[in-house]
Image: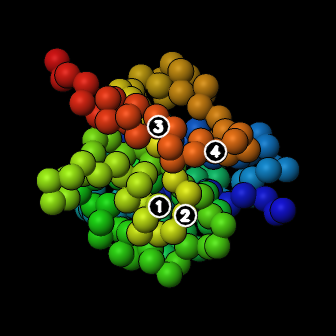
Amino acid sequence: MGREKIAIVGSGNWGSAIAKIAAQNASRQPELFEAVRIPMWVFEEEVNGRKLTEIINETRINEKYLPNIKLPDNVWATADLEEAVKDATIFIFVLPHQFLGKTIEQLKGRVSKGARGITLIKGVGVEGGEIQIFADTIERELGISCSALSGANIANEGTYTGHLKQIKLTFWYYQWLPRSSPVSSVQITISMEPRG
């Protein structure tokens, strides 16, 4: 089995924080991960008259969504989704839920056989009165195994204090829980936590 290739699908506050952690963890484990370049898909927009991808790649900072946090040199921002996910074996979905459907449509036919995913997308979807778990939607639409990591968004606090360093990408090598496990129940419970 070759080394895993990570693709970050999203680049907001949480996406940039996870890209930082994924890139650092991949660099620490080059026997498991291709660590030279971790692509992060960015919805292109202008910030102070410059493209956000250019700002991130030149300054190593996502000026709009995670200012003052330097991203590792191996994080590479691109506005081209197809380029970002090329040959990826691990997809980390971390974008606003309202963009998931369109993003999935663009990904169809571009996902490597045997690839896996994890969604960090908050909330749940509702289709025809039925609650839809985003991991299930990704699995169904892209034909890949997908798990979920959810909870309070602490991107700023985590990157400043290092709390997010506890998230390790080595979980990909643990046994995947079968769909009959209570993972969906946990995701729904977390999604419905009261906002204060």
Q: Answer with mark 2 or mark 1, whichever residue precedes in sequence.
A: 1
* Nearer to us in this view, 136 or 158: 136
Q: Nearer the viewer, mark 2 or mark 3?
A: 3
Q: CA distance from mark 1 to mark 3?
A: 14 Å
Picture quadrant of residue 176: top right
Mark 3 lies on residue: 183
SS class, disc 2: loop
Q: Amino acid at mark 3?
A: Val
Residue that carries the numbered disc 1 in the rendered image: 139
Element at label 4: loop
Q: Is residue 87 above or below residue 4?
A: below
Q: Is residue 184 left or right of residue 84?
A: left
- Alpha carbon of mark 4 to alpha carbon of mark 3: how far? 11 Å
Q: Secondary structure at mark 1?
A: helix
Q: Is residue 149 above or below residue 179?
A: above
Checking the image for residue 144, the label placed there is: 2
Q: Does any portion of residue 25 appear in the rendered image?
A: no
Residues at marks 4 and 3 touching, judged by CB atoms closer than 8 Å: no
